[in-house]
Image: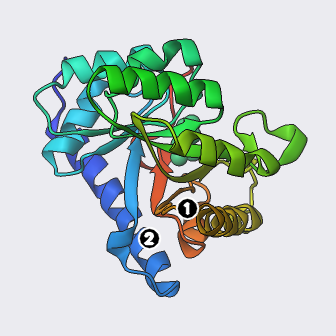
Amino acid sequence: MQEYTLARKTELSERVQAVQEDLAEAAKKAGRAPSDVTLVAVSKLHPASDIAALADAGHLDFGENYVQEAAGKQEALQGLDVRWHFIGGLQSNKAKFVAGNFELVHSVDSLKLAKKLAAKAAERGTVQDVLIQASLAGEEQKSGAEADELERLVAEASELDGLRVRGLMTMPPFFDEPERARPFFARLRELREGIGQRLGISLPHLSMGMTGDFVPAVEEGATLVRVGTRIFGARPPK
Ligand SMILES: *Cc1c(COP(=O)(O)O)cnc(C)c1O
């Protein structure tokens, strides 16, 4: 792995600090404790050295989207006490590379994927924590379970040995104006409350909010925000 420079470490940790301050302000505004919101630094397409720099500065939650890239970074950073989050679209035939290797999988969008993750995790003697991804934007959004299928997917995934459903995730369409994403965040919170109550299960987590819209997401109840660009800068093309 490439060494990081002190300048890069300082730059990255200042940006994380700035995001944490905005998160804390949004949380307080909503009457929530800042410590109830975890910042997941989305490091996809950025080098492992950036992760090492932030981990050495004390930031430990990182989000990755691509199985192979993530595995390479995990291998390179073995000694570090990092909490890895899988946040990208995942084909069920790749579940075996993910199960048991991530603290939390945010992007479970089908029963087929849930079953594969559960089976692999059980085989490895572990339980995989997951979120169920909701698609709330209709036609223009491909990934995630539609609102009317969401409850059934949560119910069925919750029954699987090897899997523990911890909450919901969503990604609203991109808006220039972050306030326009707010209704999607509010909707996810309502779905979480309704589904949790009807199924009698606890769904503590809501993963929502990215660089452009994490403030309204936190105000609407996000417990995990996934922020990439604001921390690492623009991503190189994949
Ligand atoms: C890339 C990505 C992010 C981070 O997006 P930024 O706008 O760079 O903060 C968050 N969530 C998911 C699911 C992503 O794929």
Choose between 118 and 168: the one closer to the eye: 118
Q: Residue 5 lies in what quarter of the image? A: top left
At x 78%, y 51%, the residue is 147
Q: Where is residue 31 in the image (x, y as percent from the top left)?
A: 47, 87
Residue position marked by numbered label 2 in the rendering: 22
Amino acid at dot 1: Phe
Amino acid at dot 2: Asp
Q: What element carries label 1?
A: helix
Point out which mark residue 214 bears. Answer: 1
Point out which mark residue 202 bears. Answer: none
Count all numbered tags in the image, as a single digit. Answer: 2
Q: Is residue 45 visible?
A: no
Q: Is mark 2 on a helix, strand or loop?
A: helix
Q: Residue 127 lies in what quarter of the image? A: top left
Q: Which of marks 1 and 2 is nearer the N terminus?
A: 2
At x 48%, y 49%, the residue is 226
Q: Vertical placement of 77 versus 179: above or below?
A: above
Q: Where is residue 20 in the image (x, y as percent from the top left)?
A: 36, 65
Q: Is residue 171 visible?
A: yes
Does 88 sit left or right of 118 as displayed? right
Disc 1 vs disc 2: which is toward the camera?
1
Query: Is the residue at mark 1 in contact range of ligand 1, meaning its CB lies under 8 Å from it?
Result: yes
Q: Position of residue 126 (x, y in %)?
A: 28, 32
